Amino acid sequence: MIPIIRNSIPNLFTLLNLFCGFLSVMYSAQDDYKNAAILILIGMMLDSMDGRIARMLRVESDLGKELDSLADIVTFGVAPAMMAYYSYFTYFGIPGMAIAGLFPLFGAYRLARFNINAVKSSLKYFTGVPITAAGGVLTLLTLFHWKMPEIILPIAFFLLCYLMVSTIKIPSLKDIPLPKYGIIITLFLGYAIYLVFKKEQHRFPYFIYVAIPLYVAFISYQLVRTKRKRTPK
């Protein structure tokens, strides 16, 4: 493989993640929260792939790490906050706008702290909830908040903001072998997408029909690759 192409592959996945965040914001502005949620979940898929692909191709770089942080703040910080704003906090006027803006601010602080402490960080835990997880939870809570007591969403919103910047130790999946990691993440994302996607397939962007098979193919390849490494010769 041509070096420049190989070096660009992980960054392409990261940029697609960022683009999903941008599209999600656009859909939220049009009150289309299901599409906004689907795009954030697809962003989670892409985010789980880019780093592993970089390590697999041995093309990890400082550029890729910085790009990943910029993509994360858009897709898992700004996009979920915009969903929460347009579907709930907009009814509170300017105070609602200010409250919704807290989520990407806390997320940006969390990412900056993670980046400067990345070398010192343990593989066994995260300090504070990762913005990817917080954004995914806020997305699903926002999408289905009308099925829950009204107080749940604002409480969860402020709690997630706090948890991102807290010093609470959160168990990491980094030391879990790939097959188990892949299965855990795939089951979560698969079920989340099913909840959003069922019975209205025709309404969603065609990008989902590319992203999901690509993600499944990636996980399948990694499972087979890991199994071959473990098989005695």
Image (cartoon, helix red, strand yellow):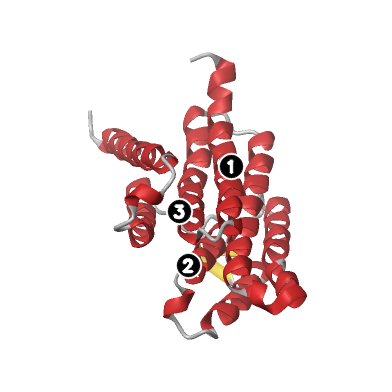
Figure check: 57 above or below 105: above
Can you give x and y, in whole percent of width and height, for residue 43 in the image?
51, 48
The residues tagged by marks 1 and 3 sit, at their Cα atoms, a distance apart of: 13 Å
Question: Which of the 4 image quarters holds residue 221?
Answer: top left
The residues tagged by marks 2 and 1 sit, at their Cα atoms, a distance apart of: 20 Å
In the image, what residue occupies the spot 75% across and 71% down?
98
Q: Which mark is residue 19?
A: 1
Q: Which mark is residue 143?
A: 2
Identify which residue, 27 or 230, lies in the foreground. Answer: 27
Figure check: 111 above or below 137: above
Task: Give the mark, 2 or 3, whose residue is nearer the N terminus.
Answer: 3
Figure check: 217 above or below 93: above
Callout 2: helix, strand or loop? helix
Residue that carries the numbered disc 3 in the rendered image: 38
Query: Does any portion of residue 162 appear in the rendered image?
Result: no
In the image, what residue occupies the spot 37% across and 43% down?
212
In the image, what residue occupies the spot 69% across and 51% down?
115
Identify which residue, 230 or 225, lies in the foreground. Answer: 225
